[in-house]
Image (spheres, rainbow, N blue to C red):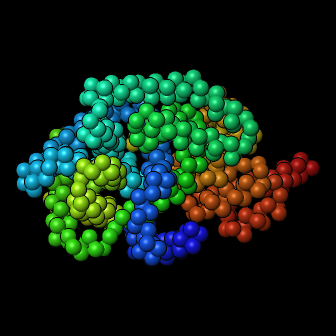
């Protein structure tokens, strides 16, 4: 096992280093790694291992949790059209058309046709949202459309899996299944709502009072995994529970720190997920059914493109570019389709070789997707040459630039904030001491709760767009760490740091900072002015 792990890490590192040189996403590298190690170690059967699948699935769980953190309940209400109208239409129309073609054109049996149709309707949450989060395109109109449709698809996985269960079981009646769904939804939403409203804030307050970073990380993992586990016990997907939990935490002041702490776990587990996807590629199936796979791939992606294009076009607020980019973003078949086919195959509802052909088609479509997402602008320009100047509208009204970021709200930070406020400057403060945070809230300061040593927290303050960053941190070691991180994000000319001694100043000069104020030196000068 250790040999497999070391080999997997080595291969993925080499491949992803090469891909990054050509500005290609790491997702492709993970999938290729999975394919390579499956042949080196004969792991094609291991991909069906239940425990491995569950571990890999938690990459999507943490992804949906972090998406939930970006979404307040108010935000979801604002997106009700994208989620419930666009999402529902896309799923229903795609399912109906693929069902019709499978049953009447390709003469598959009705159950196989229905399951394949429902699987094809799914797009890749893991790839699309990961890419859009990294590039910031989640804040564009086509990002908003894609997110809404993907959320609805994630919700739809629940009834789809239940439908498969009903088809495969002779004991379950439709009425009893519907009763279980309604009861489960009520229990899940009511339980999470009550926990979020009455227990979440006191729970976090007690954790923060311990001043322990590992306890805070542990509490976030507990909430994300716990909510997903409760959802699973009630018959829903893990990721839906995590998404709801993320939305509840988004209503608290701890949302930014929670997201920053969870990102390393999310990215690691997403990597494992894509490796398991790559492990499902079998070259003998590709060679034997090459023409069928190519035809299926082109046909399915074309059908999904036109369906998504037409339903998104119904909303007059969407520009032509946003409509085309949304359609290109979601034309692949997603990871949930693999779960649907796996469950159907376990119940002998989809027969060989259709199951393997579909799995290969899905995986190839997922491999193509990052290339499409990286070239959405080029594709849109090709189709809309006459109005290529038209920009994609940004729906995130909180986009900020030309502001001042103040790191720390101690005595010096408070003095800086007071001066900035008096001068009419717009600024954002970052502070992870709960008492100082509460004081800032009392003083009506624009503040983010979080650790300034975490680059994800710095990004939440739009640090790359700030005209100045003032480091007002008292702890010497933390100050040096924060300055090293800031150096990687912004030009040193925009950074102003206050230190206590010349020794501290010399250390910061060594890492390239220029604007350093030495407290002892300035105090000495002020005293001498009175002599």
Is residue 61 found left or right of 138 in the rendered image? Answer: right
Q: Position of residue 350 (x, y in %)?
A: 24, 53
Is 155 drawn above or below residue 338 in the view shown?
above
Residue 46 seen by the camera: yes
Going by the picture, which residue comes out furthest to the right?
531
Q: Where is residue 368 in the image (x, y as percent from the top left)?
A: 30, 65
- Residue displayed at 39% across by 53% down: 126
Is 521 drawn above or below residue 111 in the view shown?
below
Q: Quadrant of residue 302?
A: bottom left
Is 519 drawn above or below residue 8 in the view shown?
above
Q: Quadrant of residue 383?
A: bottom left
- Residue displayed at 38% across by 24% down: 183
Nearer the observer, 482 or 55? 55
Is residue 435 found left or right of 521 in the rendered image? Answer: left
Is residue 511 found left or right of 221 in the rendered image? Answer: right
Going by the picture, which residue comes out furthest to the front?
170
Nearer the observer, 116 or 495? 116
Residue 313 seen by the camera: no
Nearer the observer, 9 or 281? 281
The quarter of the rendered structure image containing the N terminus is bottom right
- Residue displayed at 47% across by 73% down: 41
Q: Where is residue 409 in the image (x, y as percent from the top left)?
A: 69, 41
Nearer the observer, 22 or 168? 168
Count the marks: how many?
A: 0
Q: Position of residue 404 (x, y in %)?
A: 58, 47
- Residue displayed at 77% across by 50% down: 475
């Amino acid at each position: 096992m250790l040999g497999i792990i070391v080999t997997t890490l080595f291969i993925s590192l080499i491949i992803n280093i090469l891909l990054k040189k050509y500005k290609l996403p790491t997702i492709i590298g993970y999938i290729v790694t999975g394919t390579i190690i499956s042949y080196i170690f004969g792991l094609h059967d291991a991909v069906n291992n239940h425990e491995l699948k569950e571990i890999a699935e938690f990459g999507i769980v943490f992804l949906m949790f972090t998406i939930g953190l970006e979404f307040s309940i108010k935000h979801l209400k604002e997106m009700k059209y994208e989620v419930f109208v666009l999402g529902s239409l896309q799923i229903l129309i795609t399912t109906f058309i693929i069902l019709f073609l499978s049953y009447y054109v390709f003469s598959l049996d009705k159950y196989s046709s229905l399951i394949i149709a429902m699987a094809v309707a799914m797009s890749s949450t893991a790839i699309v949202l990961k890419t859009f989060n990294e590039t910031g395109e989640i804040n564009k109109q086509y990002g908003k459309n894609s997110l809404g449709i993907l959320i609805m698809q994630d919700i739809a996985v629940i009834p789809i899996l239940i439908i498969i269960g009903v088809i495969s079981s002779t004991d379950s009646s439709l009425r009893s299944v519907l009763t279980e769904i309604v009861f489960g939804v009520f229990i899940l939403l009511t339980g999470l709502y009550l926990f979020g409203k009455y227990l979440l804030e006191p729970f976090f307050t007690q954790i923060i009072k311990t001043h322990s970073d590992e306890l805070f990380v542990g509490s976030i993992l507990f909430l994300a995994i716990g909510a997903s586990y409760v959802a699973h016990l009630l018959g829903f997907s893990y990721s839906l529970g995590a998404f709801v939990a993320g939305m509840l935490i988004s209503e608290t002041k701890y949302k930014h720190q929670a997201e920053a702490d969870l990102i390393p776990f999310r990215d690691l587990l997403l990597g494992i997920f894509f490796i398991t996807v790559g492990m499902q590629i079998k070259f003998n199936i590709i060679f034997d059914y090459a023409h069928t796979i190519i035809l299926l791939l082109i046909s399915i992606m074309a059908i999904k493109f036109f369906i998504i294009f037409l339903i998104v076009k119904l909303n007059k607020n969407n520009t032509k570019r946003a409509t085309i980019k949304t359609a290109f973003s979601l034309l692949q078949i997603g990871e949930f389709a693999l779960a649907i086919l796996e469950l159907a195959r376990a119940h002998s509802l989809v027969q060989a070789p259709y199951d393997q052909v579909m799995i290969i088609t899905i995986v190839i479509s997922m491999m193509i997707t990052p290339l499409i997402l990286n070239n959405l602008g080029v594709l849109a320009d090709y189709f809309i040459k006459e109005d290529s100047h038209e920009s994609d509208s940004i729906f995130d009204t909180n986009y900020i630039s030309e502001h001042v970021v103040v790191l720390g709200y101690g005595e010096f930070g408070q003095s800086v904030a007071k001066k900035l406020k008096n001068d009419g400057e717009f600024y954002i403060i970052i502070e992870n001491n709960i008492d100082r945070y509460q004081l800032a809230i009392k003083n009506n300061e624009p503040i983010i709760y979080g650790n300034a040593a975490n680059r994800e927290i710095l990004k939440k303050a739009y640090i790359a767009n700030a005209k100045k960053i003032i480091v007002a941190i008292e702890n010497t070691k933390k100050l040096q760490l924060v300055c090293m991180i800031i150096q990687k994000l912004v030009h040193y000319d925009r950074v102003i740091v206050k230190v206590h001694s010349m020794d501290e100043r010399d250390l910061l000069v060594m890492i390239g900072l220029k604007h350093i104020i030495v407290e002892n030196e300035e105090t000495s000068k002020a005293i001498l002015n009175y002599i």
